Image (cartoon, helix red, strand yellow):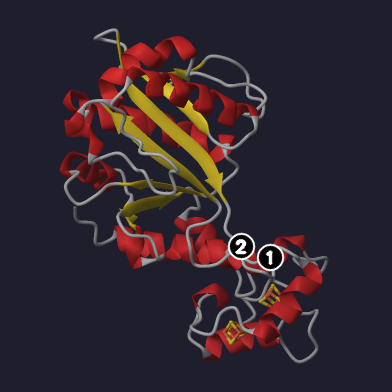
Amino acid sequence: MITESAKKDIYEEWRSYQNELILLRPIVQSDAEALFQTYSDKKSWEFFNCDNFLFPCYLEKMEHMEETVSYYMKAYSIHEFIRWTIVHKKDGKIIGTIENFHRDVRNERGDHTNALTDTALLRIDLKSEYETEEVISSILDLVEDTAYEDFHCSFLATKAVDTALVRRKVLTEKGYVRAENIAPLQDYYVRTNITKEQVKNAVPCGGECTGCGHYAKDCEGCRKTDGKVAMWDSGCEIYRCAKEHNAYICGLCNEFPCNWLRSQVTRWDKEGINTLWKLALASRIHEAQKNLSV
Ligand code: SF4
Ligand code: SF4
């Protein structure tokens, strides 16, 4: 992958990304005519993701395409979402757009929920003849290399309806799992950059022993000492409770997030409950990746 400029916040500097086959570049008004070929292509409509759209995402009039492109450019300027134009380099053609934005869903207490959150939500709109494994795979490679950092997130998600067989095949091969197994979203596929190692190294409360003043000096950490850590006289109650609930981390407990845990964890980390949500979601994704099927 070639990055065309040094990394700044993506809303300060709208970068292009490219590999051998695909160039993703900022959408411009003069793309409207070429993009109309994609958005008026009836065969491609069923694969567009129109969730939460106020207007149809397929278009039948050129003037609507021009308005849509202006709307996409405005959305960038107000940091709502980003649309890149997809250029097929070998054919020298504009073949569609991708959209990406940071989805962050929280409840009234400011906690994440089991809806997909801390996620870069990707829409891929392609002209039907380019709905191929090669093109989709090349686009996903570019997104995976850049979106976690650009959108400050730990998850990537995209929609692929049940007739989008090529998309589903490529997504599955790349380790995306069906979101409906782990979050309340139909037809979405999700993956994470939180590694199995990071989940394995997590402690029940979601914190990190390495940040504790006792660690290594007079304590080897709660996993090694079975919760009998230096900072808690009678051992750690969170550790004990997680063990009793057979939960590797509290985020994987059926009672998560219980009020008692919340009252403890937020004393030292305001985002502690959200860290546990993320670790638990990543753990479920890793588990689901073992049984991947299209
Ligand atoms: S609070 Fe408990 S679970 Fe968390 S790091 Fe300390 S000992 Fe481990
Ligand atoms: S979520 Fe609450 S009940 Fe479940 S293991 Fe953690 S502290 Fe115990």
Q: Which residue is mark 2?
A: 106
Horizontally, residue 265 falls left or right of residue 95, namely right
Residue contact between numbered discs 2 and 1, judged by CB atoms under 8 Å: yes
* Residue 285 relative to residue 6: left or right: left
Percent x, y of residue 192: 45, 50
Residue closer to the observer: 254 or 31:
31
Rendered residue at 26%/10% (across/down) = 90
Q: Residues within 10 Å of mark 1 (few under 14, many from 20)?
A: few
Q: Which mark is residue 205?
A: none
Helix, strand or loop at disc 1?
loop
Query: Which residue in the structure is indicated by mark 1?
Result: 110
Tell me the CA gap for discs 2 and 1. 5 Å
Q: Is residue 189 above or below residue 133?
A: below
Q: Is residue 218 visible?
A: no
Q: Amino acid at mark 2?
A: Arg
Q: Residue shown at 38%/26% (left/top)?
A: 97
Please tell me whether mark 2 sits on a helix, a strand or a loop.
Answer: loop
Residue 221 in view of the camera: yes
On screen, residue 63 versus residue 204, left or right, reads: left
